[in-house]
Amino acid sequence: MLSPETIKAQVESLVPGAELVVVPNGSTDNPGALLVRGEQAVAVARALREHPALRLDYASNVTGVDWPDQVLREKHRIKLIVEGEEREFEEERERRVPGYLEVVYHLYSMALGHGPVVLRLRTGNRNDQVSLPSLTPVWRSCELQEREVFDLFGVRFEGHPDLRRLLMWEDYQDHPMRKDYSDPDDYEYEPTAHDRVLARSRARQGEGAAS
Amino acid sequence: MSRTGEFEPLTVPGESGAGEGQDVLEVAMGPHHPSTHGVFRMDVAVAGERIVRLKPVFGYLHRNHEKIAETGSYLAAMPYTDRLDYFCSLTNNWAYALAVERLTGLRPPERAEYIRVITAELTRLQNHACLVGFLAQDMGASGTPLMYAFREREKILDLFESLTGSRMMCNYMRFGGCRCDLPDGWLDQARQLVADFPRFLDEFERFLADNEILMARTQGIGVLPPELAINAGVTGPMLRASGVNYDLRKVDDYGIYHRFKFRVPLGDHGDVYDRYMIRVLEMRESVEILHQALRDIPAGPILDPKSKPRGFRPKPGEAYGRIEAPKGELGFYLISDGGSNPYRYRVRPPSLINLTVLEDMCLGQTLADVVVILGSVDIVLGEVDR
Amino acid sequence: MLGAGIIKGLAETARNFVGSYVVPERLITVPYPEQRLPAQENARNFPFLVYDGDDAAAGLRCVACQICEKECPPQCIYIVKDVVKKPDHTGKLQFQPKAFDIDLSVCMSCQICVEVCPFDAIKMDTEFELSTTDRFGGLLATKDQLSKPNTYYHQIHPGEARQVDEHLAAARARLEARTLSKPAGDAGSR
Ligand code: SF4
Ligand code: SF4
């Protein structure tokens, strides 16, 4: 199997204007993933499928990952003049890292029996820029899995032939696999002896009665 | 559709029977229909006798397994994997353990690898035996073949119970090995069972293989061309029935499968009959593997000494582990952020992805064929809906 | 000839039907509840708490460390620690549970509580006839219902119980050896 760096170079030479970034992986497993910009994704995917040394004809696994907005605290050294003397201080600054939704594709080749090549696509943010191109036209195995990512994470796949919720029902609003998802507490619950849902729902009913 | 071509949106084929001015009748098959093997619905449109549209509807058994696993420890997800494909809990355990092992670098000792192969192949035997029974049931052979299959499955489940404590929810594999060693006499019982199993296969073959009704109901029905099968990510016996030689036991060579001699049966028509025959032939190959594994199994430890049940925190990173489960490629994708629970835990369910092509196989067939085609896909709703 | 395959199949059915009267492996089920299969050594259903001796309160091995409560995947164990300590099997003072409930309607018999318990206090029962008419309270097993003697443990899992006993005896012996080899004052402060 070619290394991600080689694949990156080959794809960049095949697809004009493509820019791939190798995302390293800290575990003992595969060497790293290729991060592709949304607008180039379909062209890159096709190149990966057609490339004679790769022939990635099989998209095994498609899944979403939610990376919420993060507030990083970083320490900075600053120099200030205090009482005529220059002294070093440490200052803590907060840095907001905007979150995004990521879609991960694991590609294999049935023809050549190798893999995986991991492809990652990222959305602009988690609220209004959640569109990515669908790779279903390239690998049909993405059809149901992209529907699942749309359902559970809320990524909109442009060009998907039938983008509907897969597991939740049609008029459901939220995206349960997001990290900030909280369970609704208005569903039919089964009271058990020590049940958080029960306690919460009691509190809620109490509120309702008071108002 | 060609090997390098694109997926085109489905169109009603000309010969599907939908003539000019003919009314289309919509039927909701399921979610409580005996043929759907669980709570699964197909919205079918028929013109006369022929299917012109079929949309599967999922989610009746959805419990967000992935979210549950992401909120618990790595070990806590293990018993939940039993409940994915509840026919094959041991292969589910293995796939998850394999993913965690790839994430952390734990290595199961020799004996544990053998135990894994033995339990996985026994799982495959009972899954395929039942599938063949269910398929015959779907064709109207009420009960008899299925009960013969269940009789054999019962003996395998007894072995599972005496090893793991439970017949179906085994929760047996651990990261870097297995939970407990084989009880005394277990290997002999297993050898006996494996020696007797071909007799059941012969019997089953005499019972069904020449059956004219079976052939009429399955040959040329639900044909899946190999190009479409590859592009749609179909895996497992269903893919091999279409003639694509792709078995992860050979390709990925996970565990210790390279030590065993076995063949990969391939079909050439890709119809329901081939899918049925592939399962029968795979059972024979599984028996071969079991013979070799039960002969060679060494003594020794069963768990990597670095593995621990509590306070398990893999280093940040990600891993994808996949195995050849009886239903197809079962994969687990894990992302660790260094915490005690997986940051992302994803199951690649073969049952669900094999259903991508359900509509393609059913178009132009009759409603009665849909039941048989679905039966030949081999789905378990616990895994489809997760 | 059309139909030959079906006739061949029916001959097989006939062989099975007749065979089920004579060959035991052709008829492997038993009519429950009149007849029961012997329980398997490793069989598991729901957990129970082991106590040594005859007194369930004094002999309870559980020290209310709440590890099982934390590790239980569906979170169905509920423990309240007692403020009063009691001596364990080695004579050392340990906490004890005031309440120890397992919600059997939630428990999935996974055995993880057994695996993580460092005190061999919780083990798997084989009792499965637990139907009640009360869906919630009836399926909540309390400490009194869960406590079962070590003799019962030996009865249902003989091999495993023997190993646990040996293991505990060895731990006691080690402790005693250490206490004897040290001056009396030191041992008392432990
Ligand atoms: S049963 Fe074991 S793990 Fe659970 S509280 Fe008691 S001693 Fe601790
Ligand atoms: S068997 Fe599993 S589910 Fe039941 S109490 Fe123990 S850890 Fe919890």
Image: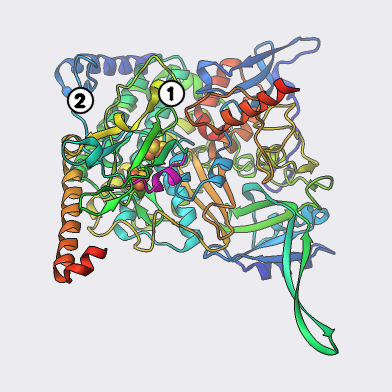
Residue sticking out furthest to the front:
C185
Residue B272, given in percent of the width and then of the height, sits at 51, 28
Residue sticking out furthest to the bottom:
A85
Asked if marks 2 and 1 fall on the same chain, the answer is: no
Does A44 appear in magenta?
no
- Chain for mark 1? B
Residue with the mark numbered 1: B134
Q: What residue span does the magenta drawing correspond to?
A: C63-73
Q: In the image, which is nearer the foreground, mark 2 or mark 1? A: 2
Residue B282 visible in rendering = no
The amino acid pointed to by label 1 is Phe
How many other residues sit within 10 Å of disc 2, few (<14), some (14-19) or many (≥20)?
A: few
Residue with the mark numbered 2: C37
Residue C131, given in percent of the width and then of the height, sits at 35, 18
Q: Quadrant of the C terminus of chain A?
A: top right
Q: Is residue B21 positioned above or below A130 on the image?
A: above
Q: Looking at the rendering, which quadrant does residue B46 occupy?
A: top right
The amino acid pointed to by label 2 is Leu
Residue A107, given in percent of the width and then of the height, sits at 63, 53
Residue A67 visible in rendering = yes
Callout 2: helix, strand or loop?
Answer: loop
Disc 2 to disc 1, how far (Cα)? 27 Å
Does C64 appear in magenta?
yes
Ligand 1 occupies quarter: top left
Q: Is residue B310 positioned above or below B137 on the image?
A: below
Q: Report the residue at 64% width, 15% height from top.
A: B28
Side of A7 relative to B339 (left or right): right
Callout 1: helix, strand or loop?
Answer: helix
Q: Report the residue at 74% width, 15% height from top.
A: B18
- Chain for mark 2? C
Q: Nearer the viewer, residue C1 or B239?
A: B239
